[in-house]
Image (spheres, helix red, strand yellow):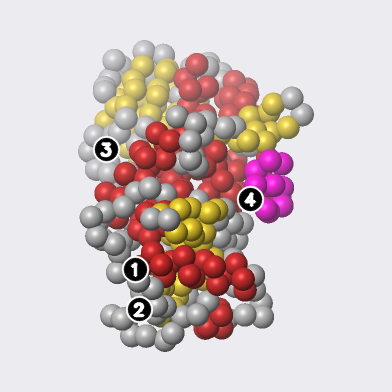
Amino acid sequence: MAAVLRLNVSWLGGGPRHLGDLSVVQGDDDVLTYDDGITLQVILLDPAVYASVEELASAARRADRPGRAVLAAGAVPVSWRSTLRKSEISFMDVGGVAEIVWPRIRVSAGQFTGQTIVRRRTPVPLQKGHALVAQELVIAGSEGERLAVTELASRARVSVSTVSRAAARLAEHGLVERRQDRRQIRVEVTDLAALAELLAERTKWPGSESIGGYVWGRTIWDAVALISRNAAQGGIAASVTGRAGAAFLGVFGTSPPAEARFWVTLDESSSLVEIAATLGLEPAPRESANIRLSADPWRVGTSRGEAGIFDGLTATVAHPVRVWCDLRGEQRGVDFAAQLWGSVSNARESGAGRRL
């Protein structure tokens, strides 16, 4: 049975789109017209209005009447879709995924054929403490953990309200799912790869401010160890990341990097230039510098710094997830990132090393 679905929504753009025998077009009314002339009123429900999939499902059941077809249309969180399918509630996502279960119509599509649909979703912001929450979720997700909101707040060192807001925004985009567990809410990562990519993109090296310099060492690894010692003695939070950090985590190439990258935390009374001097960096042109510092506005680099050992030398290294994020901007960074993910994951399975 062929039919035409006419929807008054802006994100459809031009048309038509096709879902099997169902043609979807933009129009002034929300109606479904079968090829035999029968017409049904379509009741549109915007998922963004509802706090949970249960509320959306309840609204869909209330709206269902003879002569009507109910459709959840808009940004449908990935974590909601299985519940909607089981409840046989039709939905259409702005990204092109659709499940339609109506009289004489049963279609499923991963994307519409025809012109590309314009996405209405806004980018996920990672302002203030949200970046720390996202990073802790990636760490937890890679370890198979479902953390309570209070535990997430403790690990990220942010308020419970910050965690709740960050988790809500990430859930809207299908990256995490919030579940009630007895008296607490737990957050489970539902799309680890996408969340890790988001974190890497939004908090990539360097931050808003960076500075380079030179410190003497027989090798770049000597220089890294010296900076870490000076930071510890000066009470400065500093963690090596990128290729140099990866080496201290057991992943290194055939040649050392030309410079080592450090995240440092600034307080209100210090500047990056002052910290560079405290760490023993001498001013040097870019081609002569072997150390580069970046202010850590999100605290994603220094919040999880731990000791790492390479070639008998010790340095404070950012968490493997952060090093993985920061590798992508370096030469052959994608290759090193893949090695790091696999190397640390294997160490986790054998019970040794830090987790990724």
Is 157 within the magenta? yes
The one of 204 and 43 positioned closer to us in this rendering? 204
**Lower sequence index among marks 1 and 2:** 1
Decide: is 180 above or below 2: below
- According to the image, label 4 marks what residue? 156
Is 61 within the magenta? no
Decide: is 322 above or below 67: below
Bounds of the magenta span? 150-161
Q: Amino acid at mark 3?
A: Pro
Residues marked 3 and 2 touching at CB (< 8 Å): no
**Lower sequence index among marks 1 and 4:** 4
Q: Label 4: how many residues lie within 10 Å, few (<14), some (14-19) or many (20+)?
A: many
Distance of label 1 from label 4 (alpha carbons) = 34 Å
Q: Residue at x 68, y 28 (%)?
A: 180
Distance of label 2 from label 4 (alpha carbons) = 33 Å
Q: Amino acid at mark 4?
A: Ala
- According to the image, label 1 marks what residue? 219
Disc 3 is placed on an element classified as: loop
- According to the image, label 2 marks what residue? 289
- According to the image, label 3 marks what residue? 16
Disc 4 is placed on an element classified as: helix
Q: Amino acid at mark 1?
A: Thr
Q: Disc number at residue 333? A: none
Direction from residue 210 to residue 343 in the image, left or right: left
